[in-house]
Image (cartoon, rainbow, N blue to C red):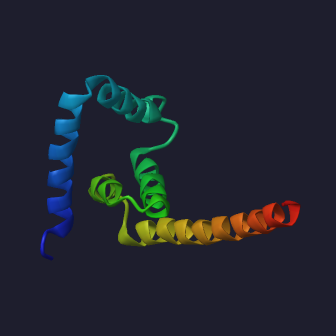
Amino acid sequence: MNGEWTNRLSALVKNIGNFAKANKPVATAFHNLEVATRENKVLDAKTHELIALAVAVTTRCDGCISAHAGAAKKAGATKEEVAAALGTAIALNAGAAYVYSARTLDAYDEM
């Protein structure tokens, strides 16, 4: 391990801090949104992090991956559980491309 993801997380934290200084209202709103997703505790921390990782993959967000991979591990997610969540993300992302391909052909036909 060369520390790539740890370094990415450190850089992310620094950059987010810089952004927060430049635009405190948006940074605060984003932080409050994240807090709100955990507020009613319907999902346990592990499930929350597994969903976050699946979404991170589908949105191709390295910052999200670096933030949520460690959080998932800390919340007790096993490598197998992470892989299962990522498998769902892969299936859904391919499914989304399939659905949007059908929609694109529909748009083409309509035009």
Q: In what quadrant of the picture does the C terminus appear?
A: bottom right
Q: Position of residue 70 (x, y in %)?
A: 27, 57
Using the rendered view, name the quadrant where residue 74 is placed.
bottom left
Name of the residue lying farthest toward the bottom = 1
Q: Position of residue 83 (x, y in %)?
A: 44, 72
Measured along the vertical axis of the image, is residue 96 above or below residue 12?
below
Q: Is residue 4 left or right of residue 27?
A: left
Using the rendered view, name the quadrant where residue 94 is placed.
bottom right
Q: Residue at x 48, y 56 (%)?
A: 55
Towards the viewer: 37 or 32: 32
Q: Is residue 15 left or right of residue 35?
A: left
Name of the residue lying farthest toward the top = 25
Measured along the vertical axis of the image, is residue 81 above or below residue 23?
below
Q: In what quadrant of the picture does the N terminus appear?
A: bottom left
Q: Position of residue 91 (x, y in %)?
A: 60, 71
Q: Residue at x 14, y 53 (%)?
A: 10
Using the rendered view, name the quadrant where residue 29 is placed.
top left
Towards the viewer: 74 or 56: 56
Q: Residue at x 30, y 31 (%)?
A: 27
Measured along the vertical axis of the image, is residue 51 above or below residue 81?
above
Towards the viewer: 105 or 59: 105
How many numbered dots are placed on residues in this image?
0
Q: Residue at x 42, y 31 (%)?
A: 33
Q: Position of residue 98 (x, y in %)?
A: 70, 71
Towards the viewer: 52 or 19: 19
Name of the residue lying farthest toward the front = 111
